[in-house]
Amino acid sequence: MERRHVFDTIASQYDRFRPGYPGEVMDRIVSLSGVTARSRILEVGPGTGQATRLLVARGLPVVCLEEGEHLARQLRETFATHAGVQVEQISFEDWPEPRAPFDLLLAAQSFHHLDRAIRLKKAARLLAPDGSLALIWNIPVPGDTELAHAVEAVYRKHGAHVRATSSTDAHELETEVAESGLFQSPDIIRLRWHQSYESAEYIGLLATHSDHALLPESERSELLGAVARVVDEHGGVIEVHRETYLYHAKVR
């Protein structure tokens, strides 16, 4: 199973444990892109709506492309009372390009899963003149506490090929976008924040990471069980530090 497809098999867990994003990141997107309640906004790979909630809270309409059946169903249920949210169960690659262009294309924690051969070209075609591409990731920041080092030791022993603080392809995309020649000079914003988890919550979060979800069940259980024991031995609560990374660029 591809990493991009595994999330649909854990849709309810994904909705429960996946973190959202700081409100400030959406405020920055709105300011940089200039979108309003009259704008056309496309969100690619919204999952269960972690970033969509920020759009809705600001009164912004959005068309969501979510290829996962269970994720799309969860998304529709979450925003059933919001007329401005339209959910289409289809992949970005297969979606027919509409005649009317969009003012903003947003992808939160999803753009790196799209087909590299077409993702930037199609994104540029979908945008109106002066339209914006906004890409967001939550990137874990390695801790320097006794507990953080103990968790890393668990990964070295039980899951050396799965890192507790795995990063994304965010920084590689900076080069890809620049080399495409399709977008203007970017705005890059990084916001630091943290969140505390009890051991069971932390294990629930880790289980929603694609590299963890794709492990054989016995291997995943052994790894996550060992992490839980370490967290419990250190007081039962772990603080996770993150950097929310925003890449915004206007189309040429």
Image (spheres, rainbow, N blue to C red):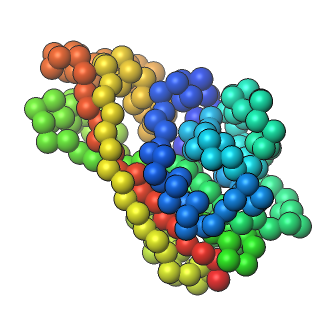
Nearer to the camera, 47 or 151: 47
Vertical placement of 184 versus 78: above or below?
below
Taking the spot 10% from the left edge, 32% from the top edge, the residue there is: 146
Q: Look at the image and tell me in which quarter the C terminus lies.
A: bottom right
Taking the spot 77% from the left edge, 30% from the top edge, the residue there is: 81
Nearer to the camera, 111 or 241: 241
- The number of discs equals 0
In the picture, residue 33 is in which quadrant?
bottom right
Vertical placement of 228 versus 209: above or below?
above
Instruction: Specify whether 212 is left or right of 161.
Output: right
Q: Residue 97 location, x and y as percent?
A: 83, 63
**Residue furthest out toward the left:** 146
Q: Look at the image and tell me in which quarter the N terminus lies.
A: top right
Q: Residue 197 location, x and y as percent?
A: 32, 25
Q: Let me know if residue 42 appears in the view.
A: yes
In the picture, residue 83 is in which quadrant?
top right
Q: Let me know if residue 2 appears in the view.
A: no
Vertical placement of 161 versus 246: above or below?
above
Vertical placement of 153 versus 221: above or below?
below
Instruction: Specify whether 2 is left or right of 210.
Output: right
Taking the spot 44% from the left edge, 45% from the top edge, the residue there is: 22
Instruction: Specify whether 152 is left or right of 87.
Output: left
**Residue furthest out toward the right:** 99
Nearer to the camera, 11 or 55: 55
Taking the spot 76% from the left edge, 42% from the top edge, the residue there is: 85
In the picture, residue 132 is in which quadrant?
bottom right
Q: Residue 185 location, x and y as percent?
A: 50, 80
Q: Residue 124 location, x and y as percent?
A: 69, 73
